[in-house]
Image (cartoon, helix red, strand yellow):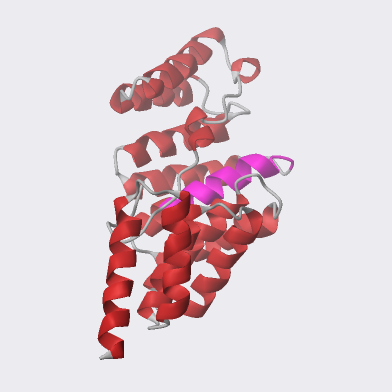
Amino acid sequence: MRTSSKYSFIFPILVILFFLLSCATGYNKYANQYYQEGLAFYDKIEYDRSIDSFKKVLELAPYGKDNDLIYYNLGMAYYKQRKYDESIYQFTKALELIPKKGIKRKFKVLEWRANAFQQKKKFDSAIKDYSDAIQLIPTHENIKNIYHNRAWSWINKGNYYKAIDDFSSAISIDPEFDASYYGRAYVWYKKADLQRAIIDAKEAVKLSPANKRYDDLSYKIKASMKKSKK
C-alpha cells in the first residue's frame, strides 16, 4: 500500500494473519466461535462481518484475557476499510490491555497504529509510535519497514536529513530493499543532490525493473540533470 502516489508505504504480508493465535483458552466456546468467524471473514475480505464477529466476542467475554488481540483485529479490519480514526481507537484499546510480557504484540500494535496515524497525516504521532516500536524490539524481523515508513513521516515534516538516515538504516538491514532506494532517491532529488539521486534511483530500477514509479523518478532526475548542464 501507499499513502500517496509519490511514495511507497510498506505493509508486511505476515501481519495480515493477525497474530493467528488462538484465544480459545480465554473464552467460552461461543466467544471462541465468533473469534474464529472473525478471522475467517477477514480472510475473505468481508470486513463488516469480521468486525461484527469480533464485537460479539467482546460482548460475550468483556474481560477475556486475550482481548488485546480482539481489539487489534478490530483495528486491522477498520484499517482495511480506511476508517483510520476507528482503527486508531481500537489499537489504543489493545495497547492498554497487552500484558507486560507481550512485547511482540505491543510491537505490532504500535506499528499499525503508526501506519494509521500516517494515513491521517498525524506525522508526529506516527513517528512516536514507530520510534517506540524500534526501541521495543530493535532486531525485529520487520524493523526495516519501520525505518522505511518512519522516513516518509520525516519527509512529510520536511526533515530530509532524518528521512535519509532512516532509509539508509533500512537499506543497511536489507541491501536489496528497492523501496528504500527509491525513497532515498526521492529525498536526494528534493534536495537537488542529483548525482546521489540518480545512483539510488538506478539501484531501485535494477532491483525492481517492473515498477513504473521508479522509472518515472529516474526520468525526472535525468531531465533535471540535463537542465542543470545548460
Is residue 206 in view from this perspective? yes
Residue that sits furthest to the bottom in the current view: 230
Residue span colored magenta: 101-115
In which quarter of the view is residue 25 placed? top right
Viewer-nearest residue: 94 or 150? 150
In which quarter of the view is residue 188 placed? bottom left
Return the x and y of residue 179 as percentages of the image width and height.
45, 55
Residue 70, above or below 24: below
User: Residue at position x 32%, y 65% from top?
Assistant: 217
Left or right of 46 on screen, residue 207: right
Viewer-nearest residue: 127 or 224? 224
Quadrant in the picture for the C terminus: bottom left
Residue 163 within the segment the image draws in magenta: no
Q: Could you tell me what secondary structure mostly forms the magenta stretch?
A: helix
User: Residue at position x 28%, y 61% from top?
Assistant: 216
Return the x and y of residue 10 as percentages of the image width and height.
45, 49
User: Residue at position x 71%, y 51% from top?
Assistant: 139
User: Residue at position x 51%, y 59% from top?
Assistant: 148
Viewer-nearest residue: 123 or 62? 123
Return the x and y of residue 74 as percentages of the image width and height.
42, 34
Return the x and y of residue 176 as percentages of the image width and height.
56, 52
